Image (cartoon, rainbow, N blue to C red):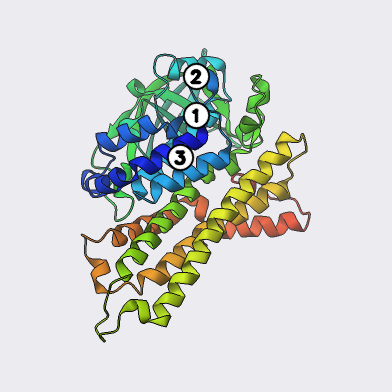
Amino acid sequence: MAHDVVHRVEEFGPRLAALAKENERLGKLSDETADLLRSSGVMRLLQPTKFGGYAAHPRDFAEAVMEVARHDGAAGWVTGVVGVHPWEAGQMDPRIGQEIWGENPDTWIASPYMPNGIAEPTAGGYVLNGRWPFSSGADHCQWDFLGAMVGDGTGKPVMPPSVKHVILPRSDYEIIEDSWDVIGLSGTGSKDVVVTGAFIPEHRTIDQSDIQEGLVAERNGVTDTLYKLPFAAMFPLGITAAVIGICEGALAAHVSQQRDRVAVTGVQVRDDPYVLYATGEASAEIEASRIQLIDGISRLYDLIDAGRPVTIEDRSNVRRNQVRCAWRAVSALDEIFARSGGNVTRRSNPLQRYWRDAHAGLQHMIHVPGVAYHANALAQMGLELPPPMRILI
């Protein structure tokens, strides 16, 4: 069934591509784009089967995200971000799944997870206040995952900080219009959300450390291998898959445009060995990124499925490679963009949008290479990682 989803995305591909310019103009996904994604089933790939999902292998999810992104980077990004949230919700208290999908299995969940809010403890839960940027796809979502620090009763966080992921319905937060004005991934509609005094029941919260260490599923009696994977492997998966898919779409556009292009020298580009060399090399680099990303999550899945422990080094290797996949693919895109001719800068040329979207995707915190590479070197040496380094490992 998961492969059927990818096939449906392939069928919808030309229409997704045709809508990309409109999504950018709107600053969010159009209703038609959202409807296409819903009808494909791509957002339900990681959703529990008891709530209408596929509980698919994460490899299938990554491939589906890439397929969406190669037609429209913004739609691929939203798919990668929003599509991973059913994976986390599926591990939590069973009441949450019923609340979200009980009436409609196509209900979407947004985020961000950065702890920009304060959750003050109160009877039965918490009272939440804060403002969060980068809530991708928020206009089409009815729930939102947010990060929050537990408060000390005075509006300040307890020390040392205690961070939670909380989930709340659309009625409990406000989407701030005109808060998403950017040069890339404009169509994602990654707007700010504001929460003022919302009550969050205890069952709609989890400790960030528990989800990072893969403890939530077991505590709630969830036994599927999928839901035992580490957060720092699964959350970046869809985001990096979107970046790679964007680069694949750019490569396809470049190849199509260069086939019959004649340079100012009068030479057909198909006879220019330098452009052809760059194109062939870029193709290999982008494909290597795809293969390495899928290989990493598959290795972790196989370890867990076999009942074997996943070490910090295992997790760190996957994160290192995931970061490198994104940078390798975008670097390859830069090489072909530079050899695509002056017409590539026209707004009517989709290649310039792919280029902008890909670079915007590198700005996400999961693609910052310094900490990921540093932590991996320590892990390979068998040394303890400082707590701040473990957050996304």
Callouts 2 and 1 close, C-beta under 8 Å: yes
Which callout, 2 or 1, points to the residue nearer the camera? 2
Quadrant location of residue 29? top left
Identify residue type, mark 1: Pro
Q: In this view, does 392 lie to the left or right of 53?
A: right
Q: Which residue is drawn at 41% across and 68% down?
A: 334
**Does 239 appear above or below 102?**
below
Q: In this view, which residue lies farthest toward the bottom?
A: 265
Say whether residue 330 is visible.
yes
> 138 or 120: nearer the eye?
138
Q: In this view, does 221 lie to the left or right of 327?
A: right
Quadrant location of residue 80? top left
Say whether residue 156 is visible.
no
Q: Mark 2 points at which residue?
A: 51
Residue 46: percent from the left, percent from the top?
52, 31
Q: Distance between the residues labelled 2 and 1?
A: 10 Å
Which callout, 1 or 3, points to the residue nearer the camera? 3
